[in-house]
């Protein structure tokens, strides 16, 4: 987290733009403005709070809708006059009901894995008779692990056969079932990527 005193508030007349990004998927959710009091409230309470230019007061995102933004990290740019807020959104972010204020295309690239993980978490509470994901989770870790093993074999067979389209399709099945397994086992793609980053950092240090 950053120290509000280190930002260049004078350069921006006391208000700095704050971009909110989904910490899991990387999708940009919205842009707001913070004064020093809003940033201090955000850091203190762990929920994104802006300065509303139209209302002339502090405004916690989701204070009326309940769709709050839970803070994961707060970063500043190189000039220290803009903020990047990494957050875990609870519900859609845009006042229109859309997930993001920047369109409905969803997270770019592999960021969709974050959206998929969130959807799987929501489906855990669904009726197993109506949701395949709920049925898998209800079957327990061993059942999901069995499906991951089966799908892994299917990917390998498709690759050996040299069928690129089939590899893509089978890999999609594998990634979906692996996402379900992470949910069932109490892990997440965030933890997986954090472990990969840790290994990369260790490898880079060892080779330097």
Image (spheres, rainbow, N blue to C red):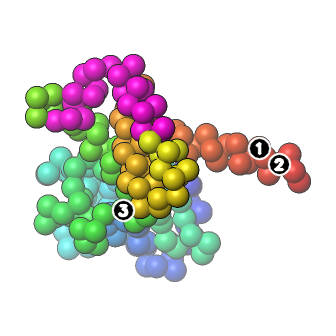
Instruction: Work out whether residue 166 or residue 181 is closer to the camera in this orientation and state it.
Output: 166
Question: Residue at horizontal 26%, vertical 64%?
Answer: 100
Instruction: Give me the C-alpha separation between circle 1 and circle 3.
Output: 29 Å
Mark 3 and mark 2 lie on one chain; the one further toward the N terminus is: 3
Magenta-drawn stretch, dominant element (helix, strand or loop):
helix
Report the residue marked by disc 2.
205
In contact (CB < 8 Å): disc 3 and disc 2: no
Which residue occupies 86% across, 46% down?
206
SS of the residue under disc 1: helix
Query: Residue 141, how many percent across, how many down?
Result: 38, 21
Please report the bounds of the magenta region as a residue range: 131-153
Question: Which residue is denoted by mark 1 in the rendering?
Answer: 202
Residue closer to the observer: 133 or 62: 133
Q: Are marks 1 and 2 in contact (CB under 8 Å)?
A: yes
- Picture coordinates of residue 24, whole percent (x, y): 42, 50
199 on left or right of 139: right
Real-space Cα separation, disc 1 to disc 2, in angstroms? 5 Å
On the image, numbered disc 3 is attached to which residue? 107
Residue 86 appears anywhere in the view? no
Residue 95 in sight from this viewpoint: yes
In the image: residue 137, left or right of residue 183: left
Towards the viewer: 22 or 108: 108
- Mark on residue 15? none
Residue 87 left/right relative to 120: right
Residue 147 magenta-highlighted: yes
| Residue found at x 36% / y 27% | 144
Query: Is 89 part of what is drawn in magenta?
Result: no
């Amino acid at each position: 987290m950053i120290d509000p005193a280190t930002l260049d508030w004078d350069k921006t007349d006391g208000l700095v733009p704050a971009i909110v990004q989904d910490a899991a998927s990387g999708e940009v959710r919205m842009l707001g403005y913070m004064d020093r009091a809003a940033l201090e409230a955000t850091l203190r309470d762990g929920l994104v709070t802006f300065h509303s230019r139209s209302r002339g007061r502090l405004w916690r995102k989701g204070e009326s809708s309940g769709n709050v933004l839970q803070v994961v990290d707060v970063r500043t740019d190189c000039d220290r006059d803009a903020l990047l807020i990494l957050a875990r959104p609870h519900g859609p972010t845009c006042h229109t009901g859309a997930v993001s204020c920047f369109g409905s295309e969803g997270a770019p690239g592999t960021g969709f894995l974050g959206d998929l993980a969130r959807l799987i978490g929501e489906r855990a509470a669904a009726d197993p008779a109506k949701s395949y994901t709920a049925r898998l989770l209800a079957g327990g870790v061993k059942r999901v692990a069995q499906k991951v093993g089966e799908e892994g074999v299917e990917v390998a067979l498709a690759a050996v056969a040299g069928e690129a389209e089939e590899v893509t399709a089978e890999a999609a099945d594998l990634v979906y079932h692996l996402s379900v397994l992470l949910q069932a086992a109490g892990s997440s793609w965030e933890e997986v990527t954090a472990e990969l980053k840790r290994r990369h950092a260790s490898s880079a240090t060892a080779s330097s």
